[in-house]
Structure formats: structure tokens, C-alpha cells
Amino acid sequence: MSASDDGGIVPSDWAVKRFGRQAGRLAAAVPVQLARAHAQAHATHLTARLKKRSPYGFTLAEAVREKLADTARELGESVRDVRGYEYAVINDHALFPFRYADRPKPLDRARLPSDASSTRRRLLRAHGPQPPEALFELEEDMTTEEYLKLHEVFEELGESTKLVCVFFTADVESGIHVIHWGEAHLEPGRTFTWLHSEQLPVAVQPFE
């Protein structure tokens, strides 16, 4: 990604293929919305006055989803409700935000937590890039019921919708450290294989 003369971001060919005419505006909006989400989560943290079990992480996750959904609406694109959570969908590509660490860490070390929600797992399995030999791979312990629930996600997000992962690191004091977006396949060990990834700039982070 590079900056354009008007202060926006020149999108890569990969981004244009996924998001079409919205690629540049979206690439510029994502860092700004993450910065705003951090400001909101930071304010919640200060209000709570808790040294442990800070609401920062939970608030940040919710705020990022909501603000990306706001961006989709501003661009005249779709917002889909998945089990009560809003996801931005631009040109049939849903943004899947995930804070993979609370300190700067290489993207190849990102891992889904063991307590990650079933909704997140199903989104990644059903809508992420899949091995060419199957629609999605089954883990050995996956039951028929779990298999069927994957198809429920199709109905909520749309069967043709593909995920674009927006992975970032952040902490309550420093804010957003780094932002990546791209296509990631969730492996059985909760690690990720990236078919494509790009780094987005970090926006100036306001405080509420």
C-alpha cells in the first residue's frame, strides 16, 4: 500500500480484485476506524478503573466490528448480522477483525485462542480460503451436528461471501501497533496459513 496525492491510500491489485471501486476508500478507512475503536476502548478502561480484568479487550473487539460496519454503510455496502454481531461486507467480502496479540508480534505467530467462540471458528472454516480438494476440511473430532452448523453460517453471511481477515495488535497504553489484512486459512492447530497478506498504515489515534 502507498499514499496517494490526496492523502488516501493507493490500493494493491489484490485489494482491487476483492473490493472493486471501494478498495482505496476502504484501505484508508480501516486504520482510522481501528484508531477510533481503540480510543473508545481506552475510555472504557479508564472509566472502569480496574487493574485486572480490564474491559479494554472486549470493548475493542466490539467497537472494531461496529466501526467497520459503519464504514460499510457509509460506502453503500452491506452489513450482515451473524449471531448478533455485525460484519461489514464489501463486494461480497466480509471483514473479519481479530486482535491477535497485546504487544507487537509477527503475523506468522498469530493463533486463534483455545476459547475462541464457535462463531469465529465457523466463519473462518466456512468462508475462509479452503484447500482445493474440499469445501472445507473436517477435524477428526467434528461431529455431524458441527458440520451442519457450518452451513448455517452460509445462510447468515451469504454462501458466496469470502472472508478478508483484518489482524492487528494493540494494547491499552500504546494503542494500535500494526495492522495486516489478507486471506488466511485456519489450520487444525489454531494457527493460520496466509495465502496473501498486506500491511496497512496505523492511523493517528485520538483519545476520547
Image (tube, rainbow, N blue to C red):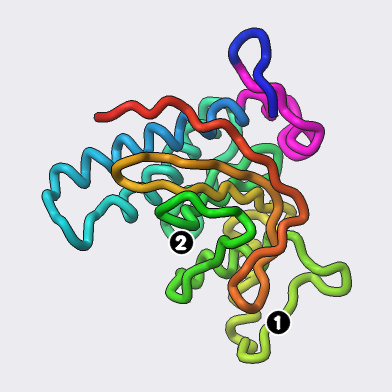
Q: Nearer the viewer, residue 105 or 196?
A: 105
Q: Is residue 127 above or below residue 75?
A: below
Local secondary structure at mark 2? loop
Q: Which residues are magenta?
A: 8-25
Magenta-highlighted stretch: main secondary structure?
helix
Q: Amino acid at mark 1?
A: Leu
Q: Nearer the viewer, residue 63 or 50?
A: 50
Q: Is residue 162 above or below residue 30?
A: below
Q: Amino acid at mark 2?
A: Arg
Q: On residue 113, which mark appears?
A: none
Tell me the crowding category of disc 1: few under 14, some 14 to 19, or many 20 or more residues within 10 angstroms, Cα based.
some
Which residue in the structure is indicated by mark 1? Answer: 138
The residue sitting at 40% across, 54% down in the picture is 102
- Of the image marks 2 and 1, the number of the one nearer the N terminus: 2
Local secondary structure at mark 1? loop
The residue sitting at 55% across, 50% down in the picture is 167
Q: Position of residue 3 (x, y in %)?
A: 65, 19
Q: Position of residue 106 (x, y in %)?
A: 58, 53
The residue sitting at 71% across, 22% down in the picture is 10
Q: Is residue 15 magenta?
A: yes
Left or right of 146? Residue 58 is left
Q: On residue 83, which mark appears?
A: 2
Q: Position of residue 32 (x, y in %)?
A: 47, 29
Q: Is residue 195 magenta?
A: no
Structural distance between the alpha carbons of marks 2 and 1: 22 Å
Q: Nearer the viewer, mark 2 or mark 1?
A: 1
CB within 8 Å, label 2 to label 1: no
The quadrant of the rendering that contains the N terminus is top right
Residue 2 location, quadrant: top right
